[in-house]
Image (spheres, rainbow, N blue to C red):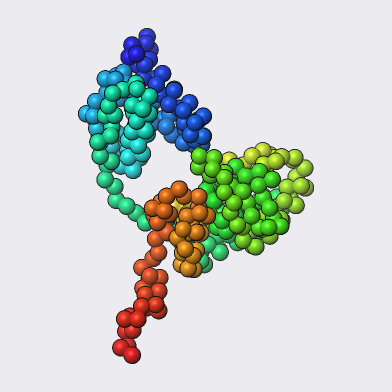
């Protein structure tokens, strides 16, 4: 291991990366998006260190992260790349390829934790109601927006839905989340109504496909296509900021929490494996927290009555 090929790439390192990627795909059942991100991150790391796996030291990992930040990469993205390197070297350690994991004690770059953006109820309704008129495109766009807000699905989960995943009678949808884990999520009445309208238009399109959401050509609508739909109608609704499908996912969770839903119920609906992940996505605005406090706490009576 560790010999340099004619192209200058460390052959041993690339072989290990390939084995790790296969492990992610086969044993971990990682999504295409995750695999693609790991490939990119580890290619960057390989290009930087130019060493065989057994020769990598902690200073190499630290140097890689520092170099990424110096080139203008955000600390959040640099932290994600460090996570990929950590997982890769942990795998090599477990497989006996290296004797120590040099990334184990490397600190993640400190970042400013920003509250995830969510829409007010009025803005959410205005966004969803923007697709007006009749026809396949309008019905599809309305159904997608309704579903995103009604069920809090990830954009990849929406694009990955098939016809058999939708149960309009029971108001349920079967979702394949991260790691291809399946869960059943309820769908609101308004979203079911919009989906039924879309399904009629889909039949009229005369494009037979088990995929639920199609583009105008009758093929699968991609994640990027769904993002464009959300951005398009957010602009039409005059909503400021960077709005995308994940904004509606967070809006779904926040509005549930404001309505009194239990955090663990929200965790299950969102498909989070850890409750701490759910807590990141369910920050309430200060005004709402104060309103709840004033109404609920016995010592909050400002009039002293």
Task: Report how many numbered discs are placed on residues in the image.
Answer: 0
Q: Is residue 64 visible?
A: no
Q: Position of residue 207 (x, y in %)?
A: 74, 40
Along the line of sight, which residue is nearer the eye, 27 or 203?
Answer: 27
Residue in front for this viewpoint, 84 or 140: 84
Say whether residue 69 is left or right of residue 217: left
Q: Position of residue 143 (x, y in %)?
A: 64, 54
Tell me which residue sits at (62%, 44%) in the image: 161
* Quadrant in the picture for residue 209: top right
| Quadrant location, the C terminus | bottom left
Residue 120, image x and y in percent? Answer: 47, 65
Residue 253 seen in render: yes
| Residue at x 37% of width, y 11% of height | 5
Q: Nearer the viewer, residue 237 or 115?
A: 115
Task: Please identify the residue farthest to the bottom as the structure is shown.
Answer: 305
Q: Is residue 240 left or right of residue 200?
A: left
Up/down of 10 relative to 92, above or below: above
Identify whether 168 is placed above or below 75. Answer: below
Q: Residue furthest top?
A: 6
- Left-right relation of 51 to 179: left
Q: Quadrant of the N terminus?
A: top left
Give residue 95's position: percent from left, percent from top.
38, 24
- Taking the spot 50% from the left edge, 59% from the top edge, the residue there is 265
Above or below — where is 183 with respect to 260?
above
């Amino acid at each position: 291991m560790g010999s340099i090929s004619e192209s200058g790439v460390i052959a041993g390192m690339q072989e290990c990366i390939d084995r790790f990627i296969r492990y992610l795909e086969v044993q971990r059942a990682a999504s295409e998006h995750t695999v693609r991100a790991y490939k990119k991150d580890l290619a960057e790391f390989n290009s930087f260190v130019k060493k065989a796996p057994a020769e990598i030291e902690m200073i190499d990992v630290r140097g890689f992260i520092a170099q990424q930040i110096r080139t203008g990469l955000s600390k959040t993205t640099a932290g994600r790349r460090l996570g990929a390197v950590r997982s890769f070297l942990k795998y090599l350690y477990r497989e006996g390829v290296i004797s120590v994991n040099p990334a184990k004690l490397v600190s993640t770059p400190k970042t400013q934790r920003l509250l995830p953006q969510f829409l007010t109820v009025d803005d959410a309704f205005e966004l969803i109601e923007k697709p007006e008129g009749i026809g396949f495109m309008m019905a599809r766009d309305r159904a997608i927006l309704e579903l995103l807000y009604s069920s809090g699905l990830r954009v990849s989960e929406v694009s990955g839905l098939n016809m058999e995943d939708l149960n309009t009678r029971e108001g349920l949808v079967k979702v394949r989340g991260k790691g291809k884990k399946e869960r059943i999520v309820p769908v609101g009445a308004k979203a079911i109504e919009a989906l039924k309208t879309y399904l009629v238009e889909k039949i009229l399109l005369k494009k037979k496909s088990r995929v639920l959401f199609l583009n105008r050509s009758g093929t699968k609508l991609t994640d990027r296509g769904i993002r464009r739909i959300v951005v398009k109608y957010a602009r039409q609704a005059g909503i400021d900021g960077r709005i995308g499908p994940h904004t509606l996912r967070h809006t779904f969770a926040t509005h549930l929490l404001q309505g009194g839903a239990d955090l663990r119920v929200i965790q299950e609906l969102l498909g989070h494996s850890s409750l701490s992940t759910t807590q990141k996505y369910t920050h309430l605005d200060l005004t709402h927290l104060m309103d709840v406090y004033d109404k609920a706490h016995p010592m909050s009576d400002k009039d002293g009555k």
